[in-house]
Every structure is written in structure tokens, then in C-alpha cells.
Image: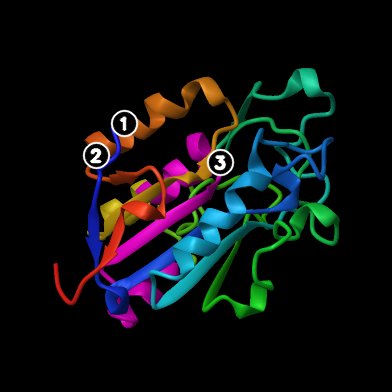
Amino acid sequence: MATNKVDIVRERTATLDVDPQKGFSELCPKELPVTGALEIVPQLLANHTFAAIKLVSRDMHPTGAAWEASTPAEMLSPVDLPEVDVKWNPHCVMGTEGVELLPGLPPVREYDFQINKGLDPDAHPYGAFYHDQADTLSTGGLEFLQVKGIDTVLVGGLALDFCVKKSVEQLLAAGLRVVLNLAATRAVFPEQFEQVANDLQAQGVELIDDTRALSLVDHV
């Protein structure tokens, strides 16, 4: 599945850390803890060493959002709203610990660009690059990459089967080369990990097992 060796040019490469937040880890067990979330930090940091700039996205939700499940049993039940598909446990609520980045990552202001999404109580976007499901309301991330002359994005974060997947698909649609570090991501539903990775590979994503597969070169 993964590629043994991937050449990248640092000056044209950015990293994207998708929602690497405490609300998706066992540090906030009542939110949306993803098994193994804390384990991705070393590989996210390793990703940074291969790129000229680094981006981070964060879920930044209000209280009482339309997608909030009142009980865990309600999670994933359908919601009939244009910008909300299903219910989720309350997570990454503004002003709470869940919004914070995982321990060991740089402070959010040390990233070159930060994307805060999900502020609208009637919307629950997954991808980092648009505020809406139709991918029309930009968060500014793609434009930032374009201005910086980036053509390759090295991706990790949480979670593979939702926000990482959608963010990667948005990058591909924008014509960017995407390298997904499998050691730097985990899935909400671990049994879906391999299938989601295979689906993304079929769309053109280059998969690596970890950063040992990366080589810095002058040109590709």
C-alpha cells in the first residue's frame, strides 16, 4: 500500500496537521477520543522537518451546535440540515481544553497558517479548506499555499476517516500533490483505516508508512 521512497523539495512543500487536538484524544474522554491519537505527535513533528511552511487546522465549535448529540447513543444519527450530516458528541468547544493542540506540538501561533473551522452552530465542516459542504466558502488555506508557491503537502492529523480524508480530497481538487503519512494519523473507526487509505491512494495520494520514506531533493 505505502510507497517505499518519496522525493520532495522542501522549498515547495508544506505540512498540514489536521485537527491534532486534545478533544480527539484520551485526554478528553467525553468528547471524541480517537484510539492512538497521542501517538501521532512524533511523526507530525518529523513531517515539519521536511517542509518550508506548516499549517494547522482546528475544530473550533460553539456550545449548543445543531449537530450536538444529547447522549452518546445519538452519535451519527442523521441531521436534516444543509451543512450538518450527522450528530456528534460535543467536542472542541471554544474556551475548553478540547480545543488545545496535543501535547508536544508547537504552540498554535508558531504555525505559519492556522485554520479554525466549525464556528457556525449550523455547520459541521470536515475539510480544512472550506467552511461549507459544497466547498465554496474558502478558509484561505489554499490561497495561502498558492501564494507561497507550494505544490506538495505532507499531511497527518485526526481523524483519517473524516477530517483528514476530506482535507486531502480538497487538496487534490486544487491540483496539489499530497503525501499522507500513515504513522501521523489515526481513524475514528480503526477498522476503516486501511480502506480509507486505499481509497485516497486510488485518488492520487502518495502513502508513506512514516517519514523514513521521505527524501529531500533539489527537484522532482
User: Is 78 positioned to the left or the right of 93 in the image?
Assistant: left
Amino acid identity at mark 1: Asp
Quadrant that contains the C terminus: bottom left
User: Is 219 positioned to the left or the right of 10 in the image?
Assistant: left
Residue drawn at (71%, 24%) of the image:
75
For residue 148: magenta?
A: yes
196 w.r.t. 55: above or below: above
Mark 1 nearby-residue class (10 Å; few <14, some 14–19, many ≥20)? few
Mark 3 nearby-residue class (10 Å; few <14, some 14–19, many ≥20)? many
Task: Tell me whether the residue at label 1 lies in contact with that at label 2, contact meaning CB atoms closer than 8 angstroms.
Answer: yes
Amino acid identity at mark 3: Ala
52 w.r.t. 165: above or below: below
Task: Tell me whether the residue at label 1 lies in contact with that at label 3, contact meaning CB atoms closer than 8 angstroms.
Answer: no
User: Could you tell me how far apart the alpha carbons at marks 1 and 3 are, in whole angstroms?
Assistant: 15 Å
User: Could you tell me how far apart the alpha carbons at marks 1 and 2 are, in whole angstroms?
Assistant: 7 Å
Range covered by the magenta-colored residues: 140-168
Residue drawn at (68%, 30%) of the image:
87
109 w.r.t. 198: above or below: below
The residue wearing badge 3 is 159
The residue wearing badge 2 is 203
The picture places residue 70, in percent across and down from the top left corner, at 84, 28
Task: Tell me whether the residue at label 2 lies in contact with that at label 3, contact meaning CB atoms closer than 8 angstroms.
Answer: no
- Mark carried by residue 116: none
Give 95 or 45, whichever is nearer the viewer.
45
Mark 2 nearby-residue class (10 Å; few <14, some 14–19, many ≥20)? few
